[in-house]
Amino acid sequence: MKRALISVSDKSNVVEFASSLVGYGFEIVSTGGTYKMLQEAGIDAIEIDEVTKFPEMLDGRVKTLNPFVHGGILYRRDLATHQETVKEHGIVGIDLVCVNLYPFKATIERTDDFDEIIENIDIGGPAMVRSAAKNFKDVMIVTDPSDYSLVLNALENSSDNFEFRRDLMIKAYEHTAAYDGMIANYMNSRFNNGFGEKQFIIGSKVMDTRYGENPHQKGSLYEFDTYFTQNFITLKGEASFNNIGDLNGAVKIAAAFGEDNAICIAKHGNPCGFAIRDTLLDAYTDALKCDPVSAFGGVVAVNGVVDAELATKMNEIFLEVIIAGRITAQAQEIFAKKKRLKLFEYGADRIVLSNDEKSFKHVDGGFVYQDADKVGADEVKNAKLVTTRKASEQELKDAEIAYKVASLTKSNCVVYVKDSAMVAVGMGMTSRVDASQCALKKAKDMGLDVRGAALASEAFFPFRDSIDAAAEAGVKTVIEPGGSIRDDEVIAAANEHGMSLYFSEIRHFLH
């Protein structure tokens, strides 16, 4: 008779799984709460201490760390010496191990009690998983309740072959690696400000992309926790590697203003249009005015619900991607006419952000890792007025919008906002004055009047030339971090031109 060892924290469908294994001729060995559940369900199971010949001890810390368990898992069926050894010591083979681990993640989300957290670090579970995975040719290792049906189907059809067992083995090591990585990251977060000697980036695959940035590159999307699985809904088309990157920039900007009806149009991850209005239709119409040329083939992020009226307006030009809180069925019908258009939503009235606490970037030979950048809730409100003129209420609102958009735009950048709509943007330039001049030239080409606009820079102006150019264009309010050795010259220039200048004293580079 074959033997299965079942010891799970996540007990989803375990009774049904164990019952089916009995039907396939397995004898069940189990532990603790799992054993009790199986017994109550009428499944004849052997309690683990009958196998180990030792009781559970040390408050359950030791129960499966025993040669009768690990010998039964690890002995090679193809080696006579192994067979002789287990026979000599009365060890019975274990042919299937079904284990998932103590709920460490749920514990740290529920409590800050370090003693309780420590007790929810699994020891015996990972040991059994690793043992079974190492001996996968002879032992099936099952760590995910969603795989129960696959395992039962393989047993039914005698398809539990080398490849099938190998795939379970890989998944098992992923399971224990992610678990240990999560524990290490938590401990470093608690005791080393999140920056330990090792850093583990743990993600679960959501999907393969058609390719990476280019057709000769492979690519996939991975998620932290279940962010994409729970929130990201594909309505039409297939997200490419580049689409996902572009979406990331657009949705962060569109969602940066709470419940406001905000729309961001982006191209290659940078904004080329943004507006906040009483209606999303007006927001889109005014966002498009900033740079309709770049908007062609771009990404539109809508912090709200796309209805039929807005969809009809959007259909007037070629857009590659639209993502929103929701897109109504009527809007989807209208968009169906556009074969190349891709539609995604969050299944909510607004965009749902993950708000990751950390960010990282690949560099040759490794990666750099940091606290995620965010504009503080009162950062603009608490900005220091350094000139004689004080901005009006609308100018301050425009300054806040420009400042937040600038914080999410590739450096060096400047953003001009007027009446809650972006009217000019310069980004990714090697000098700030070039960014300013490029933005103003584009605005002039688009026939946009920037007089009375607010200007934001994500870093300080090193010279007064950008202030002079902004004044010539009619800008009345400027917000920047300050901190240049020539701040006095910049302040003097703003006062000369009768402008309001605010220093936030916080830089927001995005490289």
Image (cartoon, rainbow, N blue to C red):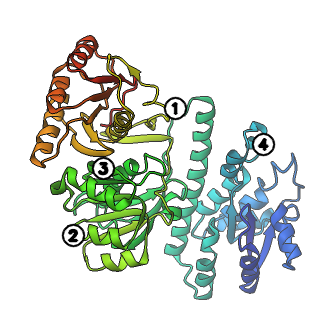
**Residue type at mark 3?**
Phe
**Residue type at mark 4?**
Glu
**Residue type at mark 1?**
Phe
- Say which residue label 2 marks: 316
Is any atom of residue 424 visible in this view? Answer: yes
- Say which residue label 3 marks: 274
Q: CA distance from mark 2 to mark 3?
A: 18 Å
- Residue at x 48% of width, y 46% of height: 201
Secondary structure under tag 3 reads strand
Closer to viewer: mark 4 or mark 2: 2
Quick one: label 4 or label 3, which is nearer the N terminus? 4
Q: CA distance from mark 3 to mark 1?
A: 36 Å
- Say which residue label 1 marks: 195
Secondary structure under tag 4 reads helix
Q: Residues within 10 Å of mark 2 (few under 14, many from 20)?
A: few
Q: CA distance from mark 4 to mark 3?
A: 48 Å
- Say which residue label 4 marks: 116
Q: Residues within 10 Å of mark 1 (few under 14, many from 20)?
A: some
